[in-house]
Image (spheres, rainbow, N blue to C red):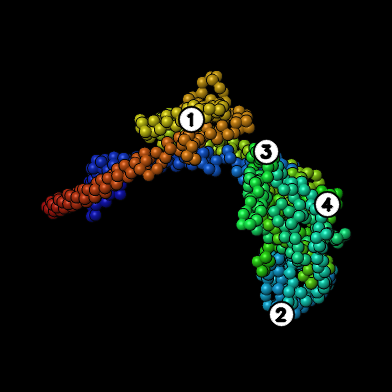
Amino acid sequence: MADGISIPGVTDKYKTNDLVNSLMEVERKPLKREEAQLENYQKQQNAWRGINQKISTLRENAKTLYSFENPFNNKIAETSDEKAITVDAARDADFGSFKIDVIHTATTDRFLSGNIDKNLQVEAGRYIFGVGTKTVDFNWKGGKIADFVKALNKRGNNLIKVSLIGINANSKSLLIEGLETGTENKLVFKEKALDFAKQIDMVKDAESTVTKLSAAMDSLGVPMTNDANPQSNLPSLSKEGVSTDGSTITIPSRGGIEIPLPEGINKDGNQRLEFTFNATETEDITESFNNKLASPTLPTPGSVAFGGLTVTNEQSETTLALQQAAAADSAPLSPVSDDNYIAIKNRDGSETAVDLSAYMYTDENGVSKVSIPLDEFPDAVGLIVRNSNTGKELSISVPESYDASKNQGFAPKHAISTAANASIKYEGITLNRPSNDIDDVIPNVTLHLHDATDKTATITVNPDTENAKNALIAFVGTYNQVIAEMNILTMNKPEVITELDYLTADEQDAAQERLGIFQGDFSLTNGKTSLQRILSSNYNLTENSTITMLKQIGISTNASSGNVGYNAAQMRGYLEVDEKKLDEALENNLMDIRTLFGYDSDGDMIIDEGIAYRLDKQASSWTQAGGIISTKIASLDTQIKSSNTKISKLQSQLAAKESELKSKYATMEGTLNSLEKQSNTMTNFANSNNRNR
């Protein structure tokens, strides 16, 4: 039976099912029209959602071209010796180049034991291992060396690492290494850990010998007085006024001393100089000097008293008035503030500045101390303390020297490396840092040290033009996708699909279903015109701008062929990129290109002009809540709901109509069958009577 229509109790002898189906087909036409309309509404809604997604992507790409993180501010750092040093440059780093010598990298303590039995039993007890001031403290219940190593590594907390190294079939060697570099991060063994380290021949007892340098005034030399802050009438640096009580040396403003180092102090390479350091503010001496220069003071002329009569002498005549006038014509002294306090005097008489920030620490009592490893200054013969300031007083303890490897009461027997600061020479200045990642030497640049340099490495910081180029090409790609979708939706021309050779077969079929769905919709055609106007406009944003249009950097609708010939695809508004021209523009006019896409026209630190800024605003009017697309989708939602209501109503009406027709035709066919039976009965009766005659 057609369309599955079946009337209960009816044999369809009279084709009533076909008749009902034909009648229902006529009744279904309004329903089919409404279902087709609903499908069209849904296609339109999906199409608006699709164009919304593409415009949103274009908006995000546009925002990246003028936001704080725009690619035109990215920097790329390169080094001539990547094996020894690599560099990261932040966005605020200055362009330029500089010279770096890596004298040596920062290292950790790495101690190796003697040969030990592979089944060595480690005694129970409290084991304390540490690096610098941080410790790993745990109670060991006793057991095999392999289990002890696992337990220690589990508790290592990124401070220490322990390894068992196979020597032969029955012997091992234990390697313990600190995981933090720098002179102050030496391996520490306490409690049972120290006993264990001695047991396995890793360390030995060593008494630290501390030598106090001479603080006698007659032994303190005058420092080299290459004054970095010379001023006429300002006192020269001098050791006059420097005082010591045998334990503390006080150095007033414009004072300085040189403390000689004992001959051969660093022959074993482990010696350190250590002293407390404090700088306090005092009354600035330039104020009193300026007062003296402006108002010369003469002695009191005196007086004579006799018989109750006092005669006062007149002030002496002097030429100081001329000197006063001359002093008044000279510039007043300016206060001096200089944090370059410490230097090492070398054997050849030169000085090496000491960066206090790399060697100063605070002990457990809150006292500021300076600890200088002399292995970083192999030619040291003296310690220079210079106070160039005019308003500070320095106070240091008499320096002491000691063997750092013996300072903890033990010394390693098989040291693979010892904890030490990194040492570099930046533009001829020697600097030391506890880490191999140094970010406080060059502003917004981080140095990563890997090895000593064989020769001076050159570091260059340049704009990241490759990243900027990729961002621009990505922007062109998303813009073209928006234009392509607008063309598909507003044109009923198959060629707008076939000319998009990057589409897959499935994508072309899907595009074919959307073709011309919004033909005649002026919101899309006007939107496309607005986008094209933004990209083709002239943006002469600054007086010195050389790049004012997008086509000047190789991005236009005919970048590949110029003005020669006709190309239908180019006429549809797609952008092309001339990579050679774009590369040249990025190389020579990067900042102009940045301005072209985003510019602060009123000085309020907020971008308010440029291609990317305008595109963002235009796209926002389409994609934001309450914008053009959301309004379109909301309107279609209303129509879809109304259509669904109509369809439900029509389906109910059709069901009732179909039920009514089935009932009527069932009754009709039943009546016909009854009449047929009566007719057959009568015929059979007549035939029977005829045979009986």
Inspect the image, locate mark 4, and give the three-letter code of the amino acid beneath it. Asn
Which residue does the numbered mark 2 point to in the structure image?
125
Residue 56 percent across, percent down from the top left: 45, 41
Q: Residue furthest front?
A: 307
| Foreground pick, 433 / 129 | 433
Q: CA distance from mark 3 to mark 4?
A: 46 Å
Residue drawn at 48 percent across, 34 percent down: 601
| Foreground pick, 235 / 586 | 235
Q: Which mark is residue 346?
A: 4
Which residue does the numbered mark 1 point to in the structure image?
535
Residue drawn at 53 percent across, 34 percent down: 595
Q: CA distance from mark 1 to mark 3?
A: 74 Å
Inspect the image, locate mark 3, and give the three-letter code of the amino acid beneath it. Leu
Q: CA distance from mark 4 to mark 2?
A: 49 Å
Which badge, 4 or 2, is on the more N-terminal residue? 2
Which badge, 1 or 3, is on the more N-terminal residue? 3
C-beta proximity under 8 Å, tags 2 and 1:
no
Q: CA distance from mark 1 to mark 4?
A: 65 Å
Which residue does the numbered mark 3 point to in the structure image?
322
Taking 220 as reference, is 461 left or right? Answer: left
Residue drawn at 26 percent across, 47 percent down: 645
